[in-house]
Amino acid sequence: MKTETLAILAVIAVGTAFVVLRSRPATEWGAAVGSGVVNAGAGVVLGIGDAVGIPRTDLTECDKALLEGRTWDASFACPAGRFIGSFF
């Protein structure tokens, strides 16, 4: 990764941690930081996988049908709100 990309990710992580920590009592700070690190790491891994074309393994049947353009199958697999929202 480029240095600029790492710097941007670090700034985003610090900013997110600041917002999360301000909204929680001091007793929950450790848990908030821990979950933030895990979620940030998972987001980076998913983003890299998407960029290189590795499919996500936790897709529902609804998501699979929508991503593959199978509108008929999606109409049966998706909740109504999700299916209608896929058109917009």
Image: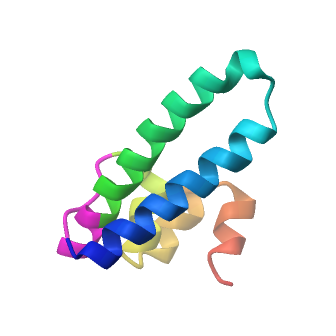
**In the current view of this chain or complex, which residue is farthest to the bottom?**
88
Where is residue 24 drawn, in percent x and y? 79, 30
> Is-magenta flag for residue 50?
yes
Q: Position of residue 36 (x, y in %)?
A: 53, 39
Between 45 and 9, which is closer to the camera in this rendering?
Answer: 9
Indicate left or right for 48 with 75 as reference. Answer: left
Q: Is residue 6 rendered magenta in the image?
A: no
Q: Residue at x 29, y 48 (%)?
A: 57
Image quadrant of residue 56?
bottom left
Residue occupying the point 33% across, 74% down: 5
Q: Left or right: where does residue 61 sit relative to residue 75?
A: left
Q: Describe residue 82's horizontal placement relative to residue 26 as left or right.
A: left
Q: Which residue range is magenta in the image?
A: 48-57
Farthest top residue in view: 27
Residue 6 in picture, x, y percent from top left: 32, 66
Q: Residue at x 18, y 73 (%)?
A: 52
Instruction: Identify which residue is drawn at 43% across, 59% down.
Output: 10
Q: Quadrant of residue 38?
A: top left
